[in-house]
Amino acid sequence: MKKLGIVAALAALLFTLHSPAAAQVKGLYWTTSGMFGPFPITDLIPSVPKEKARDITIPVSMWVIDHPKGLVVFDTGNNAAISDGGCKNYWVPGNCDGLKPSQKRDDVIDRQLQKLGYSTDKVKAVITSHSHLDHIGNIKMFPKAVHVIQKKELYQAWWPEKFQRGGGVFVMGDFDGPARDFNYLELDGDYDLFGDGSVMVLSTPGHTLGHQSVKVKLGSGKTIIMSQDAIWMQENLDGYPAGLNYSVKDYNNSVNRLKMIRDLEDGEIFFAHDQDQFKAKGNQWYK
């Protein structure tokens, strides 16, 4: 009986060490790759009624995830080349005039990591929500990382649908050349990044063919959902859909999916481009 007791105690210890609850995100930092704007909200969400219309200046969200198994970056923002007034040398002029980026060189993800005491070569994984210019812009800064992206989104980046090519939202310079030979973890759906349930990649198509969001479980037990462009801002949750979508049907399904996850886990959704939410909660750690 004594031996059975020792075996049971050891089994319980091993379960504790390897259970999902034992491994949680140590910290989550929300920052931005400069700002876009000001411009009318109806430029992005045409369905917003006149009485709710306003000018907005929006963040370009990036996230740093500190996990016991390694450092993760979720989205790398606008390419460094558009910094300090250099936009029209890299993006098509219409996007510069329309989005009005204010990015400084210190806003770029490598400098943001330095501010937090990290460096790009220490990043184990880079998750890219989708391949638009303000989310995949600096993946070339992370040649050693594993790049986590939906397989169909990676193919969409390299060969976008004809109807999506004209707007300049896919910038080949962001992911050509050496980025072609990076180590890509090409997903087809959801994925548990570290195998412990603490960092979950969620397939949320609609805005693009292979968009993905991320859900993390913090050490405090809190669930945070980083929607990225599955949900731009609060107005989308209020029923006014984003004005740029690959599939409106898939977009609505993804919005509803994230809302249900939030409600079931008593979590919180952080949007990609909400000026009010970022002003209140951006540039800080969550633990």
Image (tube, grey):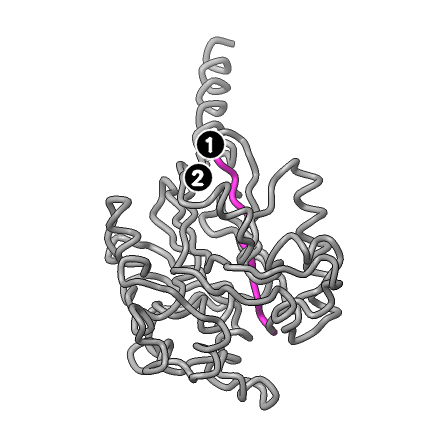
For label 1, the SS is loop
Main secondary structure type of the part rendered in magenta: strand
Residue 224: x %, y % from top left: 55, 42
Pointers 2 and 1 in contact (C-beta within 8 Å): yes
* Near-viewer residue (285 or 262): 285
Three-letter code, disc 2: Val
- Relative horizontal placement of residue 128, taking residue 121 as reference (left or right): right
Residue 138: x %, y % from top left: 34, 68
Say the numbered circle drawn on residue 25. 2
Range shown magenta: 209-218
From mark 2 to mark 1, how far is it between C-alphas? 6 Å
Say the numbered circle drawn on residue 159. none
Q: Quadrant of residue 180?
A: bottom left
Three-letter code, disc 1: Gly
**Residue at x 26%, y 47% (from the top left corner):** 115
Residue 185: x %, y % from top left: 44, 65
Magenta span contains residue 166: no
Tell me: residue 210, above or below residue 61: below
Q: How many marks?
A: 2
**Residue at x 43%, y 77% (from the top left corner):** 96
Residue 247: x %, y % from top left: 69, 74
Residue that carries the numbered disc 1 in the rendered image: 219
* Near-viewer residue (166 or 36): 36
**Residue at x 72%, y 71% (from the top left corner):** 248
